[in-house]
Amino acid sequence: MGNSFGKLFKITTFGESHGKALGAIVEGCPAGLELDEEKIRLEMQRRKPGQSKITTQRKEEDEIQILSGVFEGKTTGTPIGIVIQNSDQKSKDYSHIADKFRPSHADYTYFEKYGIRDYRGGGRSSARETAARVAAGAIAKQFLQTKNIQIQAFVSQVGELGLEKDYTELNLDLAEENIVRCPDPEIADRMIALIDQVRLDRDTIGGVVTCVIRNTPPGLGEPVFDRLHAELGKAMLSINAVKGFEYGSGFEGVKMRGSEHNDAFVKEGEEIHTVTNHSGGIQGGISNGEDIYFRVAFKPVATIMQDQESLNEAGETVTVSGKGRHDPCVVPRAVPIVEAMAALVISDFLLIAKTNKLAEI
Amino acid sequence: MGNSFGKLFKITTFGESHGKALGAIVEGCPAGLELDEEKIRLEMQRRKPGQSKITTQRKEEDEIQILSGVFEGKTTGTPIGIVIQNSDQKSKDYSHIADKFRPSHADYTYFEKYGIRDYRGGGRSSARETAARVAAGAIAKQFLQTKNIQIQAFVSQVGELGLEKDYTELNLDLAEENIVRCPDPEIADRMIALIDQVRLDRDTIGGVVTCVIRNTPPGLGEPVFDRLHAELGKAMLSINAVKGFEYGSGFEGVKMRGSEHNDAFVKEGEEIHTVTNHSGGIQGGISNGEDIYFRVAFKPVATIMQDQESLNEAGETVTVSGKGRHDPCVVPRAVPIVEAMAALVISDFLLIAKTNKLAEI
Amino acid sequence: MGNSFGKLFKITTFGESHGKALGAIVEGCPAGLELDEEKIRLEMQRRKPGQSKITTQRKEEDEIQILSGVFEGKTTGTPIGIVIQNSDQKSKDYSHIADKFRPSHADYTYFEKYGIRDYRGGGRSSARETAARVAAGAIAKQFLQTKNIQIQAFVSQVGELGLEKDYTELNLDLAEENIVRCPDPEIADRMIALIDQVRLDRDTIGGVVTCVIRNTPPGLGEPVFDRLHAELGKAMLSINAVKGFEYGSGFEGVKMRGSEHNDAFVKEGEEIHTVTNHSGGIQGGISNGEDIYFRVAFKPVATIMQDQESLNEAGETVTVSGKGRHDPCVVPRAVPIVEAMAALVISDFLLIAKTNKLAEI
Amino acid sequence: MGNSFGKLFKITTFGESHGKALGAIVEGCPAGLELDEEKIRLEMQRRKPGQSKITTQRKEEDEIQILSGVFEGKTTGTPIGIVIQNSDQKSKDYSHIADKFRPSHADYTYFEKYGIRDYRGGGRSSARETAARVAAGAIAKQFLQTKNIQIQAFVSQVGELGLEKDYTELNLDLAEENIVRCPDPEIADRMIALIDQVRLDRDTIGGVVTCVIRNTPPGLGEPVFDRLHAELGKAMLSINAVKGFEYGSGFEGVKMRGSEHNDAFVKEGEEIHTVTNHSGGIQGGISNGEDIYFRVAFKPVATIMQDQESLNEAGETVTVSGKGRHDPCVVPRAVPIVEAMAALVISDFLLIAKTNKLAEI
């Protein structure tokens, strides 16, 4: 349990950081979708390590192999099996932590839960697992593109340094033009400098990813428990290092009065819209057709290049030394992961919504 | 789809605000639990309208009826059917909004999704639906008490007015001694005054509920998608009016460095603990035995006692007038709802965790 | 777990034979269906005890109450809560078996599984539970009628006495014109006489129900595990007293050669059909548009009006005496239950199939 | 949807007959199980083509690769990814049927359902898919062996030729000593001769596999829908070519009176048993500790070495010619598939049953 996500458009993943391979099975992708493998590879590139000076310098090519579910370039409606080999395993690197609990990692909890753990690189708890999500999400994205639904995530905060403008005032396409993936070039430069300093300090720092989803039709989301934002929230909170999720006005909205927070309906031509969008495109757990936007908080990476005191499996005091090649800040590489999970959520609800009205069945 | 929550300890709910009744089916509660109906009633009292001057003055008795699954005072392992009659229906109150889309309510989205809606009091989208959750959660709580697991939620912020102390510095039992459910009596008084003012302004205001779960054993939560905090997040985000969720260090943790954020392991007697708890009791999506704590953001209630311009189903401009008896601030009554959902999540994972290790099967 | 059936069109049931009430929550019924409560009542009548001299003489009115999900006569897409009160409880009747394990009943297995059981009338294991299924199935049937899909079940065998004609040679409407629900009037008379004799012998006897589903579109069923016939099989095997399921050629087909068993395709006007239908309307787990038909075997009812030696919870030898009012043969009343479960399966797959092709989304 | 089976001990499969590979993800196998890969290979050998003169002469090595979830020879509680390469693809063999609907195959229904299909060797509808089930089931079997639960299937009928003895009168271990997998050596010889004759006739024939499960504890199965036999039935009906399922007395039980069918309880030492076992080890949908046994009907394979008239995608009359290497009778190779699916069902219910009683949590 816990390795599947989604109901109709659904993924199931497997794989450890340093096992032979990781992968996913994607179910429910409608038949007849022309699948562009190159687009999947581009998403993998956005997530992969070693892509810039502010990410880990590990080299992982993250080549995907599609084993099933696609015939003559089109999806067939059968499950799409995906495998990503682990080429750069270097298992020896991890013998020094084999029986140690690294602080704020999952070593201790996996050991308590299962009584056994693959200690190499965090095993299943490694963020390497998200490679499978990005591959699956890239398929979902291609499905959504047939409906003109666009998902764009970007870095909106690193440490204390955040965007000052609202996403509507920015050209989000600029985010992919710098290595920190922030759509404001000036703040991007400062973020890069900050991360670089943190790296030199042999430390790590947190950040926030904001995501915007455009052109979603009204009607997505299944009350009362599977509200659209509840599934988006779960999807995001299931990503490594995530500590918080808010959509629309979020935690700031708490401070507002109803009279200012309410989004007035207005007619634009034949379409119904809202004047403001504190609702974040979701009302009563269902999309209303406005932009969906949300923020995802990532903690500072737990692996730091410093010695830390800790315990081992025998309960003895030990020193955990930072080694290897790790990210000083996770958010630049988290951007495609956030998009992938968002694409999976929207795809799933899009399918479910096909069954809501008798008149459309 | 969307009316069930949980996998083994699972609830399914039904009911509209002004239908005949609402209710829940609780599955998977282990057999042999002595069920105290009085405790369920007490939880219902905490949620019910009309309990104080700062909540809605509607009168709903919220009497629960247990129809099955309990025999001679004990659970039998079969599903527990619960029904709560809707006594105070007053449907006439709602004719004035029958075809209007109230701003920031779910009227428009339900209409778009289903093509039909029960407009009386918001129908299924009404927070009245949470009565069924509280009843079910009260059963989960009794199950958790057999394991000594304690769940306490309280109001930590109303508008801009928040607690200044950490939950560990407060006596949380004090929260139930004032009508706003804030454990700091002085700030509670100010919150009450603030809500009262908002009410006089015929307006509403948002707030934050914090929840603390104590004595959870290590090992709860199912990576990678059903992380403990991901399910808690989904549970909270599925509650009416919730806009955000964060656990442990949350959004503030973003600003920290890894070297300060990491929770060092330490031995206390034979037990392993952490010195700090930025992890919020959850590492790698699995409980580590420390206190679990999280914050839930509630927006200002959308129903305000003021005229608002809006649209109707025909797309015509109409005026929506605030009528009826509504909460100026939802958080005091949200406290038991947050606890109920937390209890359901923990109960479910407690059962699943019984199947993790071969040695325990 | 185990109290829900279906994925999109889904029911969850609760209730014991002698508890306060039993009921169901029906999810996923598309919005906008005009629901005729009278039609539900008619289905309840077909299942209810006391309807003829060959069924149990217990009186249960089985009045249903719809508590939610319907507004102004139409389904709203929200869950439909149904409750059926247990009026004729007579719990005293059951004190004589409180700690005894009745042979071939579920008394022993429930006791072993849960350590506690509601012994009154079999508790949750009673076939009374199927009342909730018939109510839910009656809603599914109304949904299917909008697609012109017809489901007809009938008694095809009682003891050794079976129909000699194929269903295609019979007027199935005749089944409802006699109390045993067999479409061949002559054989029906002999079946009634046989059951009557069995009843006089204070014994019981088994039977077979055959079910035919017409006008199902091609494409229903989800390979590889949720094949249409696999779900139909599970649905039928989940009914009390069922011991076997076969569809199309079934166990007899085993004896055939491929060259005679294969169903040749043929064009009739613009439609594709098969000349024979050994496939029972299902190929590769997916409907092909031909009639779906299957047979369901019911064992003789375990409650007989004779003394039987058995054990009690303490492991002591005891005598179980037949008392009360029970069915000598279950199949006449099983007919609407089989139809109800079939309707639920088809409804569910009809919804899922709306999401198979990109071109239709 | 449709590619997963099980709730806690769960598999998800992917793969087409002539795609690159097929495989499975096995979730929920308890951590700490010593996994013997050799035992998995042995099960694969039992299913693989080309193993004897009465099975297809295709050569497929069916080498499995375990990609995750096992560390230092033990399961870790994380998902086990399995891949089986398709080495003997020979796709050219299938161009002659690219647009033809083979009679009683799934060609037509897949085309109707998805609008596109991988015609090579039946694609996803091929029985090759069961290779992934056998691999997953071999893991489940090893889990069950730690509880001493034994599953043995065997061929009990080919065409009209069936075993005359009850399984309790036979040494089931003998089944693996002949190529048809029938435990009565004399009848085995006749079955082999029959299949050989059918093969020479360029035809196919059906058969029955019987399965016996020993040492199951009482308490497995989840009423009311997930009855043990209902899940077993679904599991079996999900196997290619299966047309029927019956357990215990099955369809024959229909003919019996309750007074002969009921299984009397009796004490043997400290244990409770039944004198007869018409219940097939399952009462009220829950195991009672007696042997579980059931029969599974397989139709004659649809691919015959004869010309058949059919239609193509354009609706034109075409001739389908039997080519390639196919099984004249599927049951000898179906034996390990039946066992695999049974092992998955029992493993799943064994885990779920750990959560039934409060006293054991």
Image: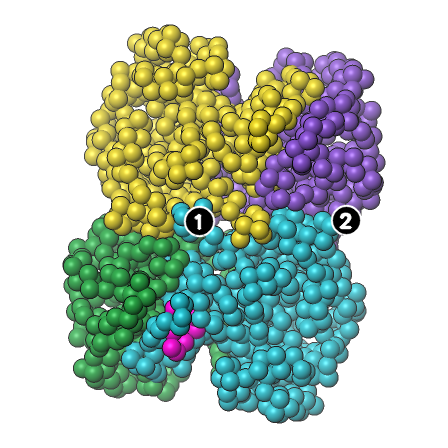
Chain colours: A yellow, B purple, C cyan, D green
Disc 1 sits on a residue from what chain?
A: C
- Residue D101 as seen in the image, left or right of residue D235: left
Picture quadrant of residue B91: top right
Any part of residue B2 in sight: yes
Above or below residue C317? Residue B97 is: above
Q: Chain of mark 2?
A: B
Query: What amino acid type should be assigned to the residue bearing mark 2?
Result: Lys
Residue B257 drawn above or below residue C271: above
Above or below — where is A60 with respect to C331?
above
| Crowding near the residue tagged with mark 2, few <14, some 14–19, many ≥20 C-alpha atoms within 10 Å | some
The numbered mark at residue B20 is 2
- On whether residue D325 falls in the magenta region, the answer is no
Predominant SS of the magenta segment? loop
Determine the residue positioned at 49% across, 74% down.
C294
**Is residue A271 found left or right of D326 in the rendered image?**
right
Q: Residue B356 versus residue D311: which sits nearer the camera?
A: D311
Is residue D281 toward the left or the right of residue D164 in the image? right
Marks 2 and 1 on same chain: no
Residue D192 % position (x, y)? 23, 81
Q: Classify mark 2: helix, strand or loop.
A: loop
- Magenta-highlighted residues: C272-281
Q: Which residue occupies 64% across, 26% down?
A: A265
Residue position for label 1: C360
Which residue shows up at 67% across the image and 43% down it? B117
